Image (tube, coloured by chain):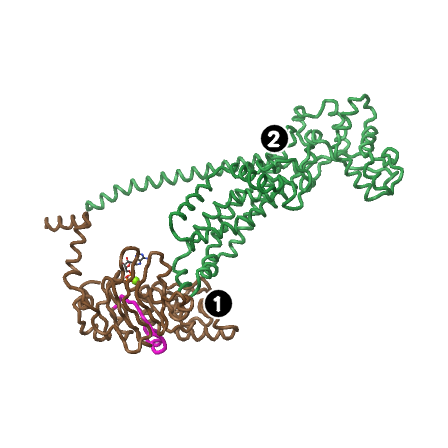
Chain colours: A brown, B green
Amino acid sequence: METAQKLNDTAQTNPAARMAQEPETMNQRIPYPERTIGKPLCDDPKMSMRNVDVFYGDSQAIYGVDLDIGKNEVIALIGPSGCGKSTFLRCLNRMNDTIDICKVKGSFMLEQDNIYDPKLDVVELRARVGMVFQKPNPFPKSIYENVAYGPRLHGLANKKFELDEIVESSLRKAGLWDEVKDRLDQPGTGLSGGQQQRLCIARSIAVSPEVVLMDEPCSALDPIATAKIEELIDELSGQYTIAIVTHSMQQAARVSQRTAYFHLGRLIEVNDTNTVFTAPEHALTEAYITGRFG
Amino acid sequence: MSKTTEQVRKSLKARYSSEKRFRAFGITAVAFGLLAVVVLFTDIISKGTSAFVETYIQLEIHWDPEELGIDDPTDPDQINVADYDALIKAALRERFPEVEGRLDRRALYQLVSSGAGFKLRDQLAANLDLLGTTQTQWLLADDDVDIFIKADVEDRQSKRLPEVARPWVEALERDGQTDIQWNASFFSHGDSREPEQAGVWAAVTGSFFTMLVTLALAFPIGVAAAVYLEEFAPKNRFTDFIEVNINNLAAVPSIIFGLLGLAIFINLFGLPRSVPLVGGLVLTLMTLPTIIISARASIKSVPPSIREAALGMGASRMQMVMHHVLPLAMPGMLTGAIIGMAQALGETAPLLMIGMVAFIVDIPGGPLDASTVLPVQIYLWADSPEASFVALTSAAIMVLLAFLITMNTLAVLLRKRLERRW
Ligand SMILES: Nc1ncnc2c1ncn2[C@@H]1O[C@H](COP(=O)(O)OP(=O)(O)O)[C@@H](O)[C@H]1O
Ligand SMILES: [Mg+2]
């Protein structure tokens, strides 16, 4: 009892002692694999990333990740918090450009195009690779304006009726049309959390992106709203390539075909979702799946 | 009762009493502030209201062409230079035939304002048929008569009206030949050496043009600077340096800005003195820091998730700012602008430096006409020896406050309109 107390004290007061303690319990005991285990690459990729390193200032957040995202597949990115899932996802539509200290290395291809090509315009890229954020963030404008924003921005609709059509079809795809069709002129921020998130999804698919990135889209929602979003992702999966970061392994199991497990900036294992959850190959993956840390 | 609950109860007592103490402090502070405001307002209003009316004297005017010195009524020059004061003097002599002697006569003539002749001139110019007729006219009284009439009977001893003139004025009053009327000239004239003719309108227009220049420059420049610093500028030593300097600038005494304006706008650029344009430029320099600081704060308060959403949809930074950040930050920016403008409106010291303290009779027609501003006018009148200027000063303060309240109300209404209710 007394020694434990003492140990705890040193851990709290002395950072070095704490650092030494942590790896022993989590990381160092299980070594990282030489290279990503499983099937990180596909035959017909929509996006393919190679040798990805990401730094925030001097600290590295992603270490040498290779990953392909297949056409029209849903890939789930899982891992303990702080392992770099969001960071990796945000590289895919260059949202990290907005963070001054963030440096991205490696090659990122969206089909034939190099995402980080200086000649490629981020405006075009983000029209092709849309993003849905963790916290529902509709614009403080009407529901209609929220969905119409992207098409207007990219000049996808010149006439009012074309825009109306895009708004309706996007809201239909997002499963929100029936709930909001009578109040399109009301503020998007007046919807419930789940509706707001579906509105955000409608907003991002209104520009017909090829890829939709979702960063923990359900973490701020209740179970029923979550179920609706999952259903929606399932429906969208035929038409869009979707990369979804999730904290919930059940969710990953329900919506994705492939699952990638990140651990402290390394991509440990990528496999069919089934395989990852039933027969993880790497010990770290297994530890995470079985809830030893998270 | 457990030991914890006991402890909690003990600490609760201290907590409640400290809360009570704090509330008492707060209420005292608010009450004190309110009291000060009430005292201030009662003082200003009680002193100032009498300036909104002025005394007129009724006289029989004979439009005698000979007395006027007009032989050809069709000649406008003759109408202009005619001796209207002679008519007034004749009318006064007729009313008080008993007054003899040079000194007494002079005192008699001074019952009527020296500006009263202009009123007769304007009337004759408009209607030449008056020549040769006789007419009762209400003529503006001199300020000493005005004060005497307005004062309570017991107080009249202390007034400045000469001893000899008192019975005359009392006689006029008895015969119903004095009247207190709305002081329209206060709201249509410029400054004057004669309190009864002095008006605040030149200063009001001067203030208006100055504020216009200030708003037109300070708001866009301040907002642009704030947007640049918040959204585009890299965060480095240089921008830190700028930030520190903006904060320092907000604390610089305003008279320094006046000296700066004198050196740069007038001496270097050769802009004219005493004009609202230069006043506006100086006040722009003075209000910019306030506007920039508050605009930055309101830009900062726009949630980052909105920015991410816009960028994620493919908006450029500029589009993100224009479509989302500015509309959301606008109400806050307007609040800052109101504070800055209110400060600028009440500012005197820097404007003295650039010559807006001049004696201005004409109503300025634009930002390049020599003019003064309300606070400077107040300063000038407060400094004048005549007793009537005391009332004028308070009246001008009331006009300034009304100006301020109008400006703020407009801004608040505008902000309400812009404010999104979601
Ligand atoms: N804007 C940032 N600046 C500095 N470090 C960051 C920033 N964003 C994330 N990081 C760091 O990068 C690592 C990965 O973060 P993140 O990608 O958000 O993890 P996850 O989404 O998997 O929880 C963390 O160690 C985090 O502290
Ligand atoms: Mg994250």
Indicate left or right for A258 with B389 as reference: left
Asked if A26 appears above or below A175 in the picture, the reply is above
The residue depicted at 14 percent of the width and 61 percent of the height is: A29
Marks 2/1: CA distance?
60 Å
**Residue A6 shown left or right of residue A112 in the figure:** left
SS category of the residue bearing label 1: loop
Q: What element carries label 2?
A: loop
Quarter residue B267 falls in: top right
> Which residue is labeled 2 in the image?
B383
**Residue nearer the viewer, A194 or B262:** B262
User: Can you give x and y, in whole percent of width and height, for residue B266 in the image?
Assistant: 59, 40
Q: Magenta part of the protein: which range? A: A230-248
Q: Please, which chain is the residue tagged with disc 2 on?
A: B
- Location of ligand 1 given as a quarter of the image: bottom left
Chain ID of residue with mark 1: A
Is residue B63 shown above or below B241? above
**Frontmost residue, A53 versus A165:** A53
Q: What residue type is labelled 1?
A: Asp
Residue under label 1? A185
Report the amino acid beneath label 2.
Asp
Q: Where is residue A158 in the image (x, y as percent from the top left)?
A: 51, 72
Residue B134 visible in the picture = yes
Mark 2 is surrounded, within 10 Å at the Cα level, by few (under 14), some (14 to 19) or many (20 or more) other residues, namely few
Compare residues A264 and B145 and report the one nearer the observer: A264
Image x and y of residue B15, in percent = 30, 42
Q: Please check whether the numbered discs 2 and 1 fall on a single chain.
A: no
Q: Which mark is residue B158?
A: none
Q: Which of marks 2 and 1 is in front?
A: 2
